[in-house]
Structure formats: structure tokens, C-alpha cells
Image (spheres, grey):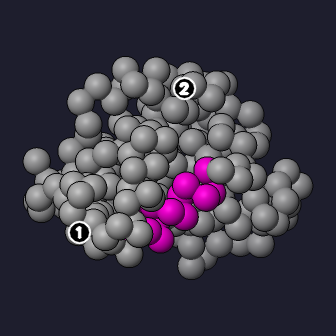
Amino acid sequence: MARVRDVGIDEVPEEVRPVYERYAREYGPFLNQVKVFAHRPPAVKHIMGLLLELHDEAVLPKRYLEIALVTVSTINACEYCIGHHAPRAVSHGLSAAAVEDILVDSPEGFDAVDILVRDYAVQVTSNFNYMKDAIFDELKRHFTEEQIVELTLRIALCGFFNRVNDSLQIETEDGVEQMLA
């Protein structure tokens, strides 16, 4: 049980309800998360709304997004996010072993771009103050600037979600792995 009570959709302002409902229905099984964020309707409107818009536009291949999110969540030991994103990573072609060992030098089945994305997620999460230009030169060989900005945003947002989820002890929804399989 989270450290704060769940807020139902009927308790949020009318203008926030469409985002709450759509996030709960379409973004994936993140209902417990939106129920906690609903204590602050602007968070639902803008943060969950941002995730929905980024999902709709999908400028970044899902495989790379999931590599980044699982990497960040593994570094931060966020079981909520790992529980949600590990099955998604597998559904986008990663092996369960690669997801489990995402921080080893060469996870099973990773190509050079997968490793680049993983290493960039590590840098943004753990060492952003000391990032070298070389990693951007390599990113620009494989991604547009728009994709690099989105990748960076999603990595940073994942760290944010890791901290909120764990600080407030948001529990993983029942049956998440089966829903995402």
C-alpha cells in the first residue's frame, strides 16, 4: 500500500479526468501510479499528459526506449518500473536474460546501438556532469536530434518516476507481468 491514499477519478477536477482516464486505460497498467499522482491534478495533467503525447508521437523506437527505461530503473532499483518495463522490453525483442543483465558489458543479443543507448542511460542517470562529446557524436550517427532530446527526456523522467514511486511506495498492480506479456 502506498504511503498516501489512492485518489479516484471522481475526486480530480473535471478538466483532468480525460488524462487520468486515458493514462489508466491506454498507457499501460499504471493505475496505482496515477491514483497517487492524482493528489496533485497538475501532475496528472502535465506529467501523465506529456507521457501520453510522447507515446502518441513515438519518434523513438520502442526497443531503445525500453532499454533506456530498464537501465535507469535497474540503476535506481525501482521494482515498480522494472516490473512494468522489463516485460515491455522483452516484447520489443530483448531476451529476458538481457533485461536481467542489462548493466553487464555485453547483454545477450545487444548490438552496438543497444549498448550505446544503455551506456547513454547510465551516463544521464549517474554521471551527467562528466558526459563527453564523443557519446553525442555516436548518438548522432544513429538518431536524429529530436530522438536524442526525447531519449534524454525519457531517461531523466524515468529517474523522476523511480524516486516518486519508491518514496511513496507505490505498489505494482496485480497481474502486471501477465498484462504486459
Query: Which residue in the structure is indicated by mark 1?
Result: 39
Disc 2 crowd, CA 10 A, few/some/many (<14, 14-19, 20+): some
Magenta span of residues: 43-55
Picture residue at 67% right of the left edge, 62% below the top: 150
Position of residue 111 measured from the top left corner of the image (x, y, whole percent)? 74, 34
Say what amino acid the circle numbered 2 marks. Answer: Val
Question: In the figure, is residue 55 to the left or right of 12?
Answer: right
Q: Secondary structure at mark 1?
A: loop
- Reply above or below: 21 against 67: below
Picture residue at 63% right of the left edge, 64% below the top: 152
- Reply above or below: 171 against 161: above
Residue 45, magenta (yes or no): yes
Q: Nearer the viewer, residue 82 or 173?
A: 173
Query: Which residue in the structure is indicated by mark 2?
Result: 90
Residue reaching furthest to the right: 141
Q: Secondary structure at mark 2?
A: helix
